[in-house]
Image (cartoon, rainbow, N blue to C red):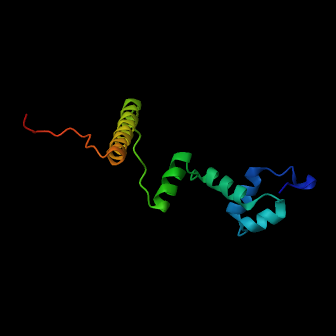
Amino acid sequence: MKMDKKKENISKEAIVAEYLTGTITYRALEVKYGVPSRSICDWVMEYQGRKPSWKEKKRRKLEIEGKTPEPELPKDVKLLQDALRRSQLKSELLEEMLKLSEEYTGVDLRKKFGAKR
């Protein structure tokens, strides 16, 4: 919604002051000034010092979804985790290739440990 030409000269502070001093609601102010009620709510919270930071918003969103925020890991730990994940995938791939080769050829290709000579 855009503000009307005659209402453009009203400031955010004036709208916030009217909300805080009166019994008027966000919706009524929205209709009166043509400003979205969500914007007015944000302005009031900002004026009162209660507007949450983006980190707080993210934390609350995760809490609502039932997840706990993952702690921030150092870059080298992330690199090591990625390398571990890749090596595990490679191992799974090789195991599957061995299994398919054994099925196709009918020959046991795995090394038998502890076999006598």
Residue closer to the observer: 55 or 22: 55
Q: Quadrant of residue 6?
A: bottom right
| Residue closest to the far left | 116
Quadrant containing the C terminus in the rendered view: top left
Residue pictured at 35% horizontal, 43% vertical: 101
| Residue closest to the far top | 76
In the picture, measured across the screen, residue 111 lies left or right of residue 1, that is: left
Residue 7 placement (x, y as % from top left): 88, 55
Residue pictured at 38% horizontal, 29% vertical: 76
Say above or below: 10 vs 77.
Answer: below
Say above or below: 63 vs 54.
Answer: below
Q: Quadrant of residue 109?
A: top left
Residue closer to the observer: 49 or 78: 78
Residue 104 placement (x, y as % from top left): 37, 46
Quadrant containing the N terminus in the rendered view: bottom right
Residue closer to the observer: 14 or 68: 68
Q: Quadrant of residue 115?
A: top left
Residue closer to the observer: 10 or 39: 39
Residue 52 placement (x, y as % from top left): 55, 51
Residue 10 placement (x, y as % from top left): 83, 52
Residue pictured at 92% horizontal, 52% vertical: 5
